[in-house]
Amino acid sequence: MIDWDDVRYFLAVARGGSVRAAAERLGVNHSTVLRRVGQLEERLGVHVFEKLPSGYRLTAAGEEVLEFADQMEASSHQLETRIFGRDQSVRGLLRVTLAPPLATHLLMPDFADFARLHPDIEMDILSSGELANLTNREADVALRVVYDRKTLPLNLHGLKGPEVFGAVYMSRDRLAASRGGAPDPVRWIVISIHGIPDWAREVRTAGVPFRVTDAEAQIAAVRRGIGMTTLPCFVGDADPLLARVPGTGLHMYGTLWLLTQGETRKTKRVRLFTEFVSRRLAGYAPLLAGLSISPD
């Protein structure tokens, strides 16, 4: 039997005109698209695309496949509408896992908006440093900052979001005091039991370290003028009490992905949530990339 997922990849290439466009649309890498299309061609015993300098063009066989693929897609949408969206009253449990700073410093207002739009959806926000297992149904949706997409399990479906950057911050009062020649040393603040972090070696700090065990304590410490620390730009740039340390640059944490798994991602409440949050994240792209302000 033909795998419907292979057909989805075929449709994405046919509509986008290239493997790259299809990969971006589906949130996967280039090789995955080629592999899926190759599987479909092997199953059918024909070539469905002709590769040209300008992109991918359907062969005569591909034109026939496209006609039936469109019908399959329409039937699939009709089935989803009947099974997963029997009425307009969307209800049920929605479990979302993400790191605490993303919940408390970025997305909670958006979660509140979504909850007001869909009052019958029971929301369970799992903001923890622990990674919930989507495969084991510990959560329905995960928001994760991922440095390398290849480290994610292949069975997860991903919507690629903006890139996330960080910078080095200290309180504005402490920065003004240090510029004025304040005698007390500037410490470096970290969530760690290890040695001096790489970023601290790039700036002049003195005194002993100040270590904390969680992000909120880290933010409180830097606000109180204890020293400097590295924070995501969406946290540091949005805080009026903090400023970037002069002479320091941005560093990339990774790319923010919206992740779902298997049949769960097809339920209406999950689709509504991922589409809603994806739009909000796109609007936050400059803040997440550290481009919303000019460094002092």
Image: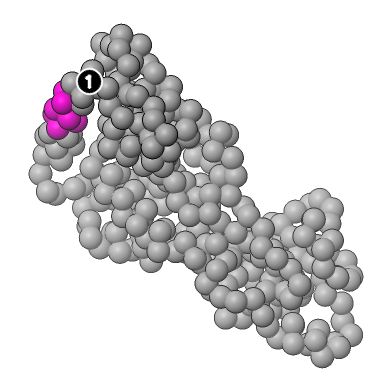
Q: Position of residue 32 (x, y in %)?
A: 45, 28
Q: Any magenta on residue 68?
A: yes
Q: What number of labels is visible?
A: 1
Numbered disc 1: secondary structure: helix
Q: Any magenta on residue 220?
A: no
Q: Main secondary structure of the magenta part?
A: helix
Apparent side of residue 281 relative to residue 168 in the rendered image (left or right): left
For disc 1, the marked residue is 60
Residue 81 seen in this snapshot:
yes
Q: Which residues make up the magenta segment? A: 67-75
Quarter of the view holding residue 83 = top left
- 149 in relation to 105, above or below: above
Furthest toward the front, the residue is: 53
Q: Residue at x 29, y 59 (%)?
A: 114
Q: Position of residue 82 (x, y in %)?
A: 11, 34
The quarter of the rendered structure image containing the N terminus is: top left
Q: Position of residue 89 (x, y in %)?
A: 14, 49
Q: Residue at x 34, y 57 (%)?
A: 279
Quarter of the view holding residue 60 = top left
- 255 in relation to 82, above or below: below
Colour mode of the rendering: one colour
Q: Badge 1: how crowded within 10 Å, few (<14), some, or many (20+)?
A: some
Q: Quick one: 295 or 15, which is closer to the camera? A: 15
| Amino acid on which disc 1 is placed | Ala
Q: Residue at x 50, y 58 (%)?
A: 102
Q: Quick one: 256 or 223, which is closer to the camera? A: 256
Q: Position of residue 29 (x, y in %)?
A: 48, 34
Residue 65 seen in this snapshot:
no
- 154 in relation to 273, above or below: above
